[in-house]
Image (cartoon, coloured by chain):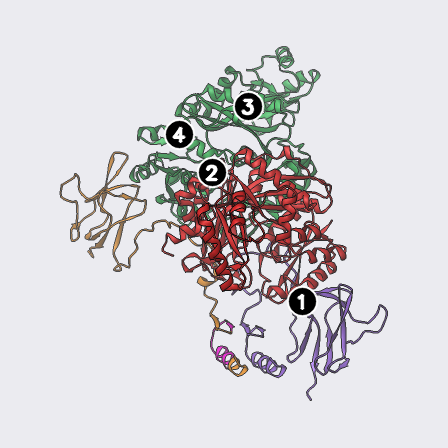
Chain colours: A green, B orange, C purple, D red
């Protein structure tokens, strides 16, 4: 492997280019028309225009990307995250063209891409999944199943969505009536009275395990990240470790994630996402078969460069570390600074960044694309910079992040920085006692 | 520097239409600035890192010429096969539907056809080289019918 | 640089349509600026972080006034003792050697004296407050002898 | 301690302000006229002008600084490095004014400030010093002394300097004649034939030990830094750990540094500088009773915030760590980017930075003052940014530093970046086999 085409843009393209450079690999960037001034174009050794601005015609244009890779003499393609990163067909086409796809096999991507199939696979591999049932016949069967699953349970109309046909049942006395209501709602809204049951996870945390694997059957996990600070499933702030995990629970979740990876003969960097309930039970949600936006917090506490590890695994090398070599130090936080206005219902605020100063100083890491004078294109995602800090403990990391965001200056566009400062100052967050409903509650407290 | 000298400078600058004037005496440092037009107002504080991205050639051209650009990324071929005659060269007359060149992408040979009637002025792209999306392949001088 | 010289400069600049004029004597530093409010002419690529540093007041003044500035950092006192009459106030006539105020620094009371004859126009610094080096304490209108 | 005045400018002022902010302390900056636009003025909660541009009238103006501290309600003064940092009188005056001086006691500063006295103190405390003698009477005595010290030895005219009256003696046969020559040169040049003898350290490395102490008698060391890459005693690149140290030697040097600190009842952060010879012998040079420019490399491998530790020690708190808590991870490098032109004999190149982009990305830390549009004042030192990187091992750190400097862009002024890249590429440096003569040899190889 000598030359890597990076089939992406934004901060992740810079991240990959940097890893390549440190490994002595040449880099080829691709870009859409209108994206000429984006930093990844300038940072790479070479850049190829692959189409007009809309992503389907450029960053998702498989033919042009592959032609660019072959024509520029690249021997590997790193997909970053988003765009083609979890497209099994693309991974397969890379292989057909003799290009190394920096990621797992197409089979692994497919296995994890189908959520139902993934759930079954995981259950078979001994990874806990959310207990659930097929269609519930009647109240008697419902009572039996609910007793097995244990309360609270959720009744869901098979064709439901948006909260319609969904009923939370806290105790046996409510079951029969709730089943009747769910059926009726399903019938009324979707002409389908079929109802399933699954365990209801109260106040879950989104805790994910980072894994690393090679082509030789070695798999290690690098601990967890807590990504519960979400707005409509968009993560806004991540931390590692998770404040709610004991070393024993970390080991259990880590082992489950390794089992998940082994079940699909995973290779490279991947993430197994779990829901964690208040009793310490965890349930498989999905596996992301790519590098994650929030990978830096894991890097900061383990000292392991995940993107380099991806590249080395793709090149066929054996993992340089074993599970017992993985050691955690301190605490890391990441804030995703988006070009969005939290005071205007998170509307995107593309435009020219007229002034920019990233924070500097000890234990502050910036993975960003923001630059003074640069116009944030309206076509793509709104992430302009990730601010990552490390501290000896959680309190130091929080104080450091507050300091860093306080000295960060972005002029010309609105950003999420004010919201991040609000999160960091919140007592619930500071206690570490938050869940996926935290941000909605915080925003609702604003009168929204 | 004496006051008289400074006065002269101030008068001179005042009569001009410079918008800013900075002087630092003792081995003299002088700045005159004429602000306003949009260009200079937009700060360009961020220099391009090394190495800069390649920028396609954009020489000044004869007005009225039509550029034929690459509709896809691919390898540019002037001829149907190695050693064969090129499809066109400077001076060739072409009409709509005539093949101008081939772009090879993933083993597929895509013929690029003329869309107008005219004369080939210049073949810009290099044979056997990767061309980007939108890159100018050749220029045509349209026929006035 | 003498006051007369400064006056000439100020007059010259006043007659011009510059909006800003900064002079730093002793090896001379001179800035003249014709800037609309907001000063968009000077590129400010780097925004000031929050909170911005305090900037001393610089209101537009009557031409010809002389500013008395702090020659040291200290606490500004208008009177020799708490409750006593202030040394000067707006309208006071002063001559060279008259005490204008006190700057206390490290328990030492430094009397600041007038260097010219004139009339106190305005006492700018606040009693009992820290003043920086170079901060304007008061303005005098020089007597034309 | 609630409000700290920072009696400094440049990157160290930013460093201290950041540490204060993370500890919840308010900050007061001081600045000279002409330095209004310097970043430390903007970053502090408040700023006070303390005099005209020349440092003796401003940053060294004790009266104005103390008046600013008292007048702004500060209760502590952090001197940074340089300027008043090792001025015992200033430290004493702070105390007289009821201000906490963030540093050791005036007595400790004085004890280490006098180099001869410090050497005697250290010898008495069992810290190795370079073996040497008083005036050498004659060739016979010289032979006896040289035998004791062990060859090679250096003969030095008492009044000598600049190489005059200095003679290297490799073996006994050369001694008598060398003594005679040194005497004559001393007599001719300085009318003083007195000659001393000391051990000659061949190809020494400059290795310094970081120590931390509190007001309660606790002292720990945080390992070493190698600062051998110097040009005329100006350090240009530092690393931690030192490639030449074994864990055993690190322990021995660390213990010696702790003895040195204890001998002067040291408090706060300090550095004991040693010369290390090729056989692993080390000799006390001096102790710097302040934070050092190169402190970040130690921070990066220990995870300990030295400036916070200084502030906490000054506030009277006990050290949070014991020696056994100090753990080293990975490798760190620092490049001091100066506004100097290495192609023009390192002439300062002050002026306006017309364009600036600091490196970003994983394990890159910037402690800098450079900003686009900022004029580097000609009055002070030329350090515009420190680029610090961390890696799992030395090879990764070097590759990362090359990557970081490669993406750093400074326009409008010349910097030392090209020289740093040259050092990083040098085989001798890459082997880690360098000494204080390395940079002179590298530059001489250029034909200079």
Q: CA distance from mark 1 to mark 2?
A: 48 Å
Mark 4 — on which chain does it sit? A
Residue D332 visible (yes or no): yes
Q: Which residue is mark 3?
A: A254
**Depth-wise, is mark 1 or mark 2 nearer the camera?**
2
Mark 3 — on which chain does it sit? A
Q: Is residue B1 above or below residue B127?
A: below
Q: CA distance from mark 3 to mark 4?
A: 22 Å
Q: CA distance from mark 4 to mark 2?
A: 24 Å
Nearest to the observer: residue A305 or residue D326: D326
Among the 4 quarters of the image, the one containing residue D302: top right
Image quarter in which the C terminus of chain C is found: bottom right
Whether labels 1 and 2 share one chain = no
Q: Position of residue D82 (x, y in %)?
A: 60, 56
Q: Position of C42 compared to C138: left or right?
A: left
Q: Position of residue D254 (x, y in %)?
A: 60, 39
Residue D241 falls inside the magenta stretch? no
Q: Residue at x 44, y 26 (%)?
A: A319
Q: Which residue is mark 2?
A: D394
Q: Secondary structure at mark 1?
A: loop
Image quarter in which the N terminus of chain C is found: bottom right
Whether labels 3 and 4 share one chain = yes
Mark 1 and mark 4 in contact? Answer it, CB < 8 Å. no
Among the 4 quarters of the image, the one containing residue A171: top right
**Disc marking residue C133:** 1
Q: Which residues are magenta?
A: B8-24
Q: Position of D409 compared to D135: left or right?
A: left
> Which residue appears farthest toward the right when viewing the image?
C83
Q: Which residue is mark 4?
A: A314
Q: CA distance from mark 1 to mark 4?
A: 63 Å
Q: Secondary structure at mark 2?
A: helix
């Amino acid at each position: 492997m000598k030359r890597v085409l990076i089939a992406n843009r934004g901060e992740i393209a810079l991240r990959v280019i940097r890893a390549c450079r440190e490994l002595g690999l040449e880099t080829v960037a691709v870009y859409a028309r209108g994206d000429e001034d984006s930093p990844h174009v300038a940072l790479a050794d070479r850049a190829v225009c692959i189409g007009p601005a809309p992503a389907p015609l450029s960053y998702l244009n498989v033919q042009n990307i592959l032609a660019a890779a072959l024509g520029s003499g690249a021997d590997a393609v790193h997909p970053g995250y988003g765009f083609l990163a979890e497209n099994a067909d693309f991974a397969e086409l890379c292989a057909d063209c003799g290009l190394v796809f920096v990621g797992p096999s197409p089979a692994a991507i497919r296995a994890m891409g189908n959520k139902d199939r993934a759930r079954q696979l995981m259950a078979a591999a001994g990874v806990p999944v959310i207990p659930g049932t097929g269609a519930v016949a009647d109240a008697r069967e419902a009572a039996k199943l609910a007793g097995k699953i244990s309360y609270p349970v959720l009744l869901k109309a098979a064709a439901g969505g948006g909260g319609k046909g969904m009923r939370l049942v806290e105790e046996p006395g409510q079951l029969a009536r709730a089943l009747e209501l769910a059926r009726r709602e399903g019938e009324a809204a979707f002409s389908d009275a079929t109802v399933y049951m699954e365990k209801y996870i109260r106040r879950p945390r989104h805790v994910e395990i980072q894994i690393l694997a090679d082509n030789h059957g070695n798999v290690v996990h690098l601990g967890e990240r807590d990504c519960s600070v979400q707005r409509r499933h968009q993560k806004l702030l991540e931390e590692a470790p998770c404040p709610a995990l004991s070393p024993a629970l970390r080991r259990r979740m880590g082992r489950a994630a390794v089992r998940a990876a082994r079940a699909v003969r995973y290779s490279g960097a991947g993430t197994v996402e779990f829901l964690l309930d208040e009793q310490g039970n965890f349930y498989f949600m999905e596996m992301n078969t790519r590098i994650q936006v929030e990978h830096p917090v894991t890097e900061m506490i383990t000292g392991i460069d995940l993107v380099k590890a991806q590249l080395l695994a793709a090149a066929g090398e054996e993992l340089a570390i074993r599970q017992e070599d993985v050691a955690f130090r301190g605490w890391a936080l990441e804030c995703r600074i988006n070009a969005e206005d939290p005071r205007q219902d998170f509307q995107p605020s593309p435009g020219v960044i007229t002034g920019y100063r990233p924070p500097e100083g000890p234990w502050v890491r910036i993975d960003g694309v923001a630059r003074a004078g640069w116009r944030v294109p309206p076509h793509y995602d709104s992430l302009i910079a990730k601010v990552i800090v490390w501290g000896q403990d959680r309190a130091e990391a929080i104080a450091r992040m507050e300091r860093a965001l306080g000295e960060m200056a972005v002029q010309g566009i609105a950003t999420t920085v004010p919201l991040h400062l609000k999160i960091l100052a919140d007592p619930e967050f500071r206690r570490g006692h938050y869940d996926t409903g935290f941000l909605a509650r915080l925003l609702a407290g604003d009168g929204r | 520097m004496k006051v008289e000298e400074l006065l002269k400078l101030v008068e001179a600058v005042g009569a001009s239409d410079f918008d800013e004037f900075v002087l630092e005496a003792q081995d003299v440092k002088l700045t005159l600035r004429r602000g306003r037009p949009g260009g200079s107002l937009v700060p360009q504080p961020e220099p391009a890192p090394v190495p800069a991205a390649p920028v396609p050639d954009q020489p000044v051209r004869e007005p009225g010429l039509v550029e034929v650009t690459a509709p896809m990324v691919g390898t540019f071929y002037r001829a149907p096969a190695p050693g064969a005659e090129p499809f066109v060269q400077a001076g060739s007359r072409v009409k709509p539907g005539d093949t101008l060149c081939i772009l090879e992408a993933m083993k597929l040979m895509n013929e690029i056809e003329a869309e107008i009637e005219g004369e080939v002025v210049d073949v810009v792209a290099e044979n056997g080289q990767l061309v980007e999306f939108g890159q100018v392949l050749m220029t045509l001088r349209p026929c006035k019918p």
